[in-house]
Image: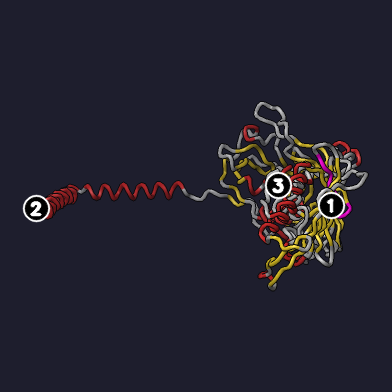
Amino acid sequence: MNEKVKGIVIGAVVLAALGGTFGILKLTGADKVQTDESSSSKASTASSRVDESVQLLDCASSDIKEIDVTNSYGSFTYVGASDSGKENASITELKGLELASRKVSDIGEDTAQLTAYKLAEKDASDLAKYGLEEPESEFVIKFADGSERTFLIGIKAHQNRYRYLCEKGSRDVYMVMESTISAFLGRKEDLVNTTLLPTPADNEDNFGKLTVSRKDLDYDIVFESDDGSYERSNENMPSAQVMTEPIFSYLNGTTSTDVIYALYGLTAMEAEVIFPTEEQLAEYGLDDPAATVTFTGDGYDYKLTIGGEYHDVNEEGNEQSAASAYYCTFEGAEGKDCIWKIDATALPWVDLDPINVITTLMTWNMVVDVQELRFTGEENASFALTSAGEGDDRELSAVKCDGKDADVELFKSLYQYVLTCPTNQEIYFKDVEGEPYQTIEIDCGSYTDKIELFKDTDRRSIVKLNGRVSYRIQSKWVDRLIKNVEAVKTGGTVEEDY
């Protein structure tokens, strides 16, 4: 018997057996039992889902005039929105601060439709076991018609997302979803809008001047938009901003972004203190701040002051060594008169090292824009450049060294070596005396970038860029530069290592 026939026979036997079983079930009524059990199970499930909710309040939020709240953090008063809609719901004690509008309006809306998940116990003999003898919060609802109702909030129920609640004077205890009454358990400060400066739309991006002043530095770090004053083939720049203090430098487009734009969208973890006094500012280290960041431009003048550190505590109760947040103030925007706790990762200026955000290129001139490259000092040479083509298709077509033809590709290697002068070793801006031992001039016709190299120690040289002391580099780089210039002159090999 082949395999196909064998399979058909076996299948027929199995079906017959199943058919016989089905017949036995029909005769004995076992299928009815199974159906009845299924119906019973469905009925049981339906029964377990019976709605036991109790509507404690059923009105419009506009019917609520005020809610007076008292809890372990203090007290505050919610004031409902005006009937005309001209005034939004507010918190009396937070007048003058920008509120988290959704959180505040939710107070009125959730209270107006206050609903219990279920009645936990009717006419309870012991309110203490629900935390209602000494409640964690009490809120008094004052209605527009002059009536009042007071509710007490107790401890968490055995199902954690619920709290026990009763109306003052009643012993009926309810379980209420904690999220609907959370504002009555928390701080009034948590109802303040924690976004300090919104992110502008692209067409509103008006970057002026960002200045970082730090207690641990004897210089400021300043960033400005390149408005043309520093133009060097600007369309090719990695960043629209430049560093102007403590040195002038173009910026690394990747590492500088967070530093430049971190104020946009800056959001605090929470408002620690509202309307702080001078004493409170001192308490949080804001009278002698670790850093200040000022951001000024057309139509704005912001100041972020970064004060004392906040440290998380581990499971053993010990503070972590690294600060997880800082206490700050923010000026220049309305409704921000608070001491804010801000995550340390949102404050890149606290430990900013300028060397980490500047470009690794000494200057930013494309070779096709250069007309002449001149070396004077220990090495003397003049390279005249000719480029052909238009726009993006322009290419360096010819190079003459001291009037003689030079290899174009070899010169490109030399020019790349010049541009990659190791600026990422150390910025330096103390005055330097004497004459440079080597000068490089990059003449682009309408402007010339000038690099001057001065002896510092046997192993270090100081660099002036366009008349400003800017970097300290290894003298080995200059030694290799001189050899590379000679290599282009003689047709040798330009080497990158030094």
Q: CA distance from mark 2 to mark 1?
A: 95 Å
Mark whose residue sits in front, 2 or 1 = 1
**Label 2: which residue?**
2
Check residue 411 for magenta coloring: no
Mark whose residue sits in front, 1 or 3 = 1
* Magenta: main secondary structure: strand
Which mark is drawn over residue 183? 3
**Pointer 3 local density, CA inside 10 Å: few below 14, some 14–19, many at least 20:** some
Identity of the amino acid at label 1? Thr
Q: Circle 3 sits in a helix, a strand or a loop, which is it?
A: helix
In terms of image quadrants, where is residue 381?
Answer: bottom right
Is disc 2 in contact with disc 3, using a CB cutoff of under 8 Å?
A: no
User: Is residue 125 in sight in this rendering?
Assistant: yes
Nearer to the camera, 281 or 489? 489
**Pointer 1 local density, CA inside 10 Å: few below 14, some 14–19, many at least 20:** many
Q: Circle 2 sits in a helix, a strand or a loop, which is it?
A: loop
Q: CA distance from mark 1 to mark 3?
A: 68 Å
Give the mark nearer the N terminus: 1 vs 3: 3
Q: Which residues are magenta?
A: 460-467
Identity of the amino acid at label 3? Ala
**Label 1: which residue?**
439
Mark whose residue sits in front, 2 or 3 = 2
